[in-house]
Amino acid sequence: MTRRFRLASVLRARLAQESAAQATVVRARADAAAAADRHARRQRALTGHPSLAGGTASCYAAALSARQAMAGEVAAAAQLAAAAADIVGVRMTELTSAAVRRRSVETLAERHAAEQQCADERASQLAIDEIATTRRGSTGAEPA
């Protein structure tokens, strides 16, 4: 007399939610790594940019403007990298909550399985007791 676990479909849904959350964490980590890489490349480009050496005033102004533009790009890339790292944190929190929800339903499934096994063992023991009682009654001496 096996009873079906009524929350099996909920458990499957929670597993799917957790898998989706894992996928978003992987994507967020890849995006964060790409943003950090872009920041590092722009930082290296800025430090490798030639210094403001002598020359005409227009060359000096152009070099200064280029350097300021590159510094702005580095700052923007740093902000994007920080935002991507924050998104990874948010996605990890979502994954953790999805795992907790899945685990709570799994715990219920484990309890159900344990209760079902106890019920099966009780039924089996009752059947064994019934057989033993029946045999004992049929082999006994009948009163006269």
Image (cartoon, grey):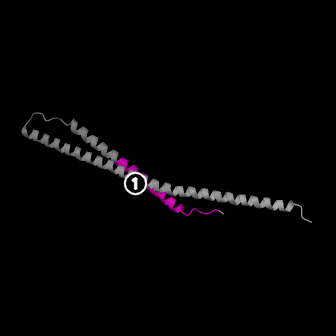
Q: Position of residue 104 (x, y in %)?
A: 49, 56
Q: Is residue 56 left or right of residue 13?
A: left
Q: Is residue 46 magenta?
A: no
Residue farthest along the right direction in this orientation: 144
The local secondary structure at tag 1 comes to helix
Residue at 12% from the left image edge and 33% from the top image edge: 53
Which corner quadrant holds the N terminus? bottom right
Q: What residue span does the magenta drawing correspond to?
A: 2-31
For the residue pair 144 and 103, the one nearer the viewer reads as: 144
Residue at 8% from the left image edge and 41% from the top image edge: 58
Q: Amino acid at mark 1?
A: Glu
Residue picked out by circle 1: 94
Residue at 22% from the left image edge and 45% from the top image edge: 75
Residue at 33% from the left image edge and 45% from the top image edge: 34
Which SS type dominates the magenta stretch? helix
Q: Is residue 16 among the parts visible in the rendering?
A: yes
Residue farthest along the bottom direction in this orientation: 144
Q: Position of residue 140 (x, y in %)?
A: 87, 60
Vertical arrangement, residue 13 with respect to residue 82, above or below: below
Q: Residues within 10 Å of mark 1 (few under 14, many from 20)?
A: some
Vertical arrangement, residue 142 with respect to residue 18, above or below: below
Q: Is residue 90 left or right of residue 8?
A: left
Residue farthest along the front direction in this orientation: 144
Which corner quadrant holds the C terminus? bottom right
Q: Is residue 61 left or right of residue 5?
A: left
For the residue pair 102 and 19, the one nearer the viewer reads as: 102
Q: Position of residue 9 (x, y in %)?
A: 52, 62
